[in-house]
Amino acid sequence: MDKATKAALYSALLAWSVVRAGSAIIQAAPFKKGTVQVADIIRVSADALKAVDLSYLFLMLLLVAALWILSIVDAYQLGKKMVTISTTRGNPE
């Protein structure tokens, strides 16, 4: 599996987790039909965070940070490879 595929899979898994958690919070929220207040969103988010165990929350944050760092390293390596390829093609000595 090449690095671009791995980066795409990391992004897809992370994005899917965020969408799934966000939709669960929104579905559980007691919003009035047609009106969404910022204060209500903040309150519901705070209630959801209170319901999560702190060690689980720390584990999720650690996973997000690790994936973020891996995506940065991966992007750097792919960019470096692209620069090497374009330099080699432009200067075929």
Image (cartoon, rainbow, N blue to C red):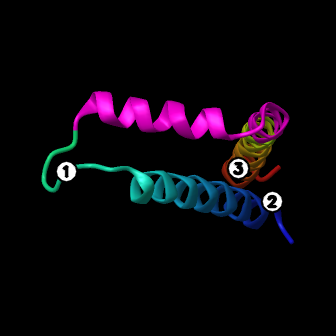
Q: Is residue 19 left or right of residue 38?
A: right
Q: Amino acid at mark 2?
A: Lys
Residue 40 among magenta residues: yes
Q: Residue furthest left?
A: 34
State which tag comes first along the sequence, 3 or 1. 1
Q: Helix or strand or loop: what does disc 3 sit on? A: helix
**Residue 5 vs residue 15, the one in the foreground:** 15
Which mark, residue 32? 1
Over which residues does the magenta segment extend? 37-62
Percent position (x, y) of residue 3?
81, 59
Tell me what residue is drawn at x 74 percent, y 53 percent.
85
Tell me what residue is drawn at x 63 percent, y 63 percent.
12
Residue 1's quadrant in the figure?
bottom right
Q: Is residue 78 above or below residue 38?
A: below
State which tag comes first along the sequence, 2 or 1. 2
Q: Amino acid at mark 3?
A: Met
Tell me what residue is drawn at x 77 percent, y 44 percent.
67
Residue 83's quadrant in the figure?
top right
Camera-near label (2 vs 3) is: 2
Residue that numbered label 2 is attached to: 3
Residue that numbered label 3 is attached to: 82
Q: Helix or strand or loop: what does disc 1 sit on? A: loop
